Amino acid sequence: MKLTDVIRRPLITEKTTGLREEAQTMVFEVAVGATKVEIKRAVEQLLGTKVAAVRTSIAHGKIKRQGRYAGQRPDWKKAHVRLRDGEKMPDFLEGA
């Protein structure tokens, strides 16, 4: 899997902004088939920071209805990436 395919997008919410400021943790939506080692390697090479730990979780897609028809959104994977002590947060996340 290519490095650019592993990380889909950063998740920017109030909760993840608090994590980023207090715990030096970034949260990303990643490919469902990506492993912790691949996520760590992708973040270190693409963003140029050293990673201390990676935690992942699967978010199951919600069931959505429109009238009598029901469908399901796809499952997706979330990764919490904690940076090493002394590492600087990447510039593109500073203003978010």
Image: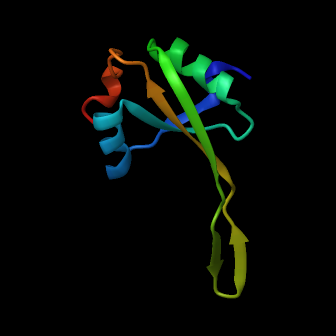
Say if residue 13 shows up in the picture.
Answer: no
Q: Residue furthest left?
A: 95
Could you tell whether 66 is left or right of 21 in the image?
right
Q: Is residue 56 above or below residue 86?
A: below
Whether residue 32 sits left or right of residue 82 in the image: it is right
Image position, residue 12 (x, y; %): 38, 44
Vertical relation: 79 (above or below) 53:
below
Residue 44 place in picture, x, y as percent: 52, 15
Residue 26 placement, left or right of 29: left
User: Which image quadrant is residue 90 in?
Assistant: top left
Depth check, front residue: 80 or 32: 80
- How was the colour assigned to the protein in this rendering? rainbow
Residue 51 against residue 5 in the figure, above or below: above
Question: In the rendered image, which quarter is residue 8 located in?
Answer: top right
Q: Quadrant of the C terminus?
A: top left
**x and y percent of residue 91 in the render?**
31, 21
Q: Residue at x 44, y 14 (%)?
A: 49
- Is residue 43 in view? yes
**Hey, which quadrant is residue 38 in on the image?**
top right
- Across and down, in percent, residue 71 comes to 71, 71
Residue at image position (66%, 59%) is 60
